[in-house]
């Protein structure tokens, strides 16, 4: 059974940094398309970014501040978040496109990020 487990969330001040991790178990990470999403209280889930092969894509709201990377040896995908803003406060979820179909079908349980002003 394939599982995704996020970690690394927490409370940080405006302008600070956090690095989220997503460990995938049950299959090799390899070049599996992976994404990060977030959901703020009272809002819809929002796309943050994705890593497709060696190419990354980001939402305009995080471009230049967030970076997605992978370590296949550790079966882990990272979301490095810099210059954090209060509007980045949300539960962050990693997702996998396990069938490489263009749709994310596997999701982690989420990790909370809170940015204080």
Image (cartoon, rainbow, N blue to C red):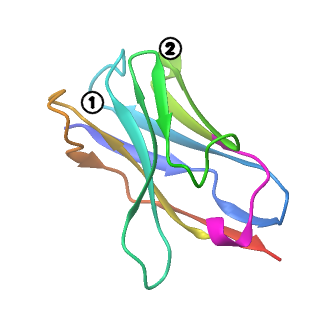
Identified at 59% across, 55% down, the residue is 61
Q: Residues within 10 Å of mark 1 (few under 14, many from 20)?
A: few
Give the residue at x 36% y 73%.
Answer: 44
Q: Which residue is mark 2?
A: 73
Q: Position of residue 112 (x, y in %)?
A: 57, 66
Relative to 60, residue 24 above or below: above
Work out how far the residue at label 1 is from the one at label 2, CA to CA, in angstroms: 14 Å
Count all numbered tags in the image, as a single digit. Answer: 2
- The circle on residue 26 is 1
Pointer 1 or 2: first along the chain: 1
On the rendered structure, is 112 left or right of 46?
right
Q: Is residue 26 above or below residue 112?
A: above
The quadrant in which residue 34 appears is top left
Q: Does 101 sit left or right of 49 as displayed?
A: left
Q: Quadrant of the C terminus?
A: bottom right
The residue sitting at 19% across, 45% down in the picture is 105
Estimate how packed mark 2 is, as few (under 14), some (14 to 19) or many (20 or more) residues with alpha carbons within 10 Å.
few
Find out whether residue 4 is within the magenta segment: no
Q: Nearer the viewer, residue 66 or 22?
A: 66
Disc assigned to residue 44 = none
Q: Residue at x 79, y 75 (%)?
A: 116
Query: Residue 22, how many percent across, how many down?
Result: 48, 40
Give the magenta part as a residue range. Answer: 80-88
Query: What is the x, y in percent for residue 1?
Result: 19, 38
């Amino acid at each position: 059974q394939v599982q995704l487990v996020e970690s690394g969330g927490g409370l940080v001040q405006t302008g600070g940094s956090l690095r989220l991790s997503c460990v995938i178990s049950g299959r090799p990470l390899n070049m599996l398309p992976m994404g990060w999403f977030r959901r703020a209280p009272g809002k819809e889930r929002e796309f943050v970014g994705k890593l497709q092969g060696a190419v990354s894509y980001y939402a305009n709201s995080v471009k230049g501040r967030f970076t997605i990377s992978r370590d296949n040896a550790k079966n882990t995908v990272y979301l490095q978040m810099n210059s954090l803003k209060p509007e980045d406060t949300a539960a962050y979820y990693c997702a996998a496109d396990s069938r490489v179909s263009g749709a994310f079908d596997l999701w982690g349980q989420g990790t909370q990020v809170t940015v204080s002003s």
